[in-house]
Image (spheres, rainbow, N blue to C red):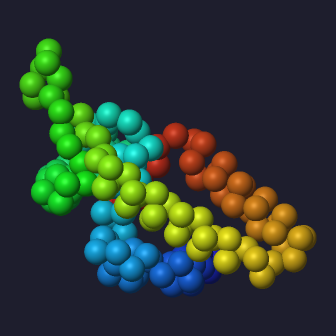
Amino acid sequence: MINDIRNFNRKYTQLLGLLNKKVFNTDFSLTEGRILLEIKANYQCSPQMISQNLNLDKSYTSRIIKSFEKRDLLIKTSNPKDLRVKKILLTELGNQLTDDIDQKSIQQIQRLLETLSDQELKDFYKSVMTLEKILFEKGDQNVEN
C-alpha cells in the first residue's frame, strides 16, 4: 500500500511538472510561487503567517520575501503600535504575476481534466474530495520528519 501511494505521488508530481526548477516558465521556484499565492490569498498577512501556513522554515521564508521586496513584487508595512510586526502586500507587479501563475495553474488542471469522460470526471472529483476530507479536515498534519 505504501509503495502504491508513493508511486502515485511520483507520477502525479511528474504529471504536473512540479520537479521543474521554475513554475510555469517564470523565474520562480514552486515554493516561491506558493508564497506569492499565499500572500495574495491572505491580504495584509505577516511573514510568520506565510511560514506557518505553508509549513516553511521562518528564515527561508524571510529570505524569499526579502527577494520579492527587492524585485518590487511586494511591500512591507509596520504596525504603528508594534514596529516588530510586519504586514506584506503585493504591489501591482506582484498582483499581475500571481494572477498569471494562478491562471496558468487553472489551465493546467483544465487540460488534465479535459480528456476525462463525464463519469471519470465525477469519480476523479469525488476521489479528490475524499482525500481532502481524510487528510486535511482532521486539523494540521505535518508528515515531514
Residue that protrudes farthest toward the top in the picture: 81
Which of the two residues, 27 or 5, is positioned nearer the viewer here?
Answer: 27
Q: Which residue is drawn at 50% across and 60% down?
A: 102
Q: Residue at x 76, y 68 (%)?
A: 124
Which quadrant: the C terminus?
A: bottom left
Which quadrant: the N terminus?
A: bottom right
Residue that protrudes farthest toward the left in the picture: 83
Q: In this view, does 117 lie to the left or right of 35?
A: right
Task: Kindly tell me whether residue 51 is visible in this rendering.
Answer: no
Q: Position of residue 103 (x, y in %)?
A: 54, 63
Q: Position of residue 80 (x, y in %)?
A: 14, 18
Residue 117, image quadrant: bottom right
Q: Is residue 93 left or right of residue 5?
A: left
Residue that protrudes farthest toward the front in the picture: 92
- Residue 10 drawn above or below residue 145: below
Q: Where is residue 47 in the image (x, y as percent from the top left)?
A: 24, 42
Q: Which residue is drawn at 72% across and 55% down?
A: 130
Q: Where is residue 121 in the image (x, y as percent from the top left)?
A: 81, 69
Residue 63, image quadrant: bottom left
Which of the two residues, 89 or 59, is positioned nearer the viewer here?
Answer: 89
Which of the two residues, 129 or 47, is positioned nearer the viewer here?
Answer: 47
Give the total of numbered labels: 0
Which of the two residues, 128 or 3, is positioned nearer the viewer here?
Answer: 128
- Residue 61 drawn above or below residue 44: below
Task: Kindly tell me whether residue 88 is visible in this rendering.
Answer: yes
Q: Residue at x 39, y 79 (%)?
A: 25
